[in-house]
Amino acid sequence: MADFEGPMNRRGALGRFLTIPSLIAGLANSQHCHADDLKSSSDSPAEKNSWPFQCTDECFVLYANHEIRNSQLYLSELKQLKADLSEVLELPCDRGEYHLVLFDCETSFREYIQHYFPRVPLRRALFIKHRGPGLIFTYLHDDLLIDLRHEGTHALLNEACGPLPLWLDEGLAEYFEVAREQRFAGCPHLKETRWRVRLGQVPNLERLESAQDMADMDANDYRDAWAWVHFLLHRTSESRHALNQHLIQISQLNAEIRLSRQLKNLFADFRSEFVAHFKSYPVGS
């Protein structure tokens, strides 16, 4: 097993979330991890009824190993995220049930994940698809709401669309992880993206689309994936519609479709449009 000593972060070559195919359909391999990442087929965290704290709000269920006084804050954040995804992406996000497992500290979180998922690369927050409901695992820390929105986006989109292209899945999660009032102009990625555009550096969408494994993406790729999602959602109503239709196509056809090909039909030069989009922002802090 890997050594996870030291502070945990969210990004890394091995990625931040794992998708495990439903055990009901059989433990098949996925592109992110293998069936033997589970300790045993009988160890299902979602089926445990001995959690000290549990509460439910609509389709979200919160489990914790300690009493949580502000549990509604976390569940409300996920409910708002669900509403935002439905509105912005025009997707049916009312499918399925989602379980949030929240630990009181990093140590408890580590011990639990290493017991049930001993081969899963450990990150500060994890989305794991296992036996039906999507599972979000994390612990109390300063950026908890950011991580809930990020992993919650993965969980909701996985249920609404099925597996997305890696760059798009991460780009959307990066976009929706910030508070809703900051998504247009308050994301930390925006300042660096604007400077890079002014230096003539346009992220290569086709290269991002070729990423098949979390090891293919680094921190710069997460920023660039966010940038393309921001461009699509805010450049024009047509670009937002193209993204929304792309997500619908993926959910219906269950096939790999390259968005860059569709953008070539939408814009005479979509890279120039990308530059114009981010040059419209002032370069300040």
Image (tube, rainbow, N blue to C red):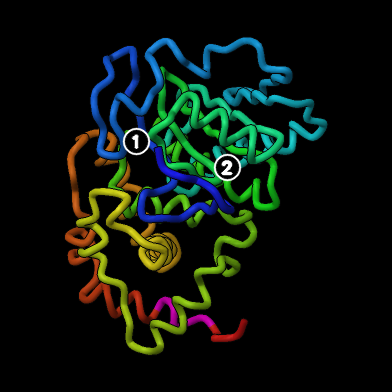
* Main secondary structure found in the magenta portion: helix
Q: Residue at x 25, y 41 (%)?
A: 249
The correct choice, above or below, for 185 with respect to 144 in the image is below
User: In the depicted view, which residue is nearer to us: 279 or 215?
Assistant: 215
**N-term-proximal mark, 1 vs 2:** 2
Q: Quadrant of the N terminus?
A: top left
For the residues marked 1 and 2, what is the alpha-carbon distance in whole angstroms? 16 Å
Instruction: Report helix, strand or loop for mark 2.
Output: helix
Q: Residue at x 30, y 39 (%)?
A: 32
> From the viewer's perspective, is 157 left or right of 49?
left
In reply to whether residue 254 is colored magenta, the answer given is no
> Which residue, given by chain and number where applicable, does mark 1 sit on?
161
Q: Quadrant of the C terminus?
A: bottom right
- Residue 21 placed where, x, y %? 32, 25
The correct choice, above or below, for 140 with respect to 278 in the image is above
In reply to whether residue 279 is colored magenta, the answer given is yes
User: In the depicted view, which residue is nearer to us: 20 or 169?
Assistant: 20
Going by the numbered disc 2, the residue's amino acid type is: Leu
- Residue 169 placed where, x, y %? 37, 48
Q: Which residues are magenta?
A: 277-281
Q: Residue at x 50, y 42 (%)?
A: 151
Q: Residue at x 54, y 86 (%)?
A: 283
> Which residue, given by chain and number where applicable, does mark 2 sit on?
81
Dot 1 alpha-carbon crowd within 10 angstroms: few under 14, some 14 to 19, many 20 or more: some
The correct choice, above or below, for 28 with respect to 148 in the image is above
Extreme-right residue of the structure: 69
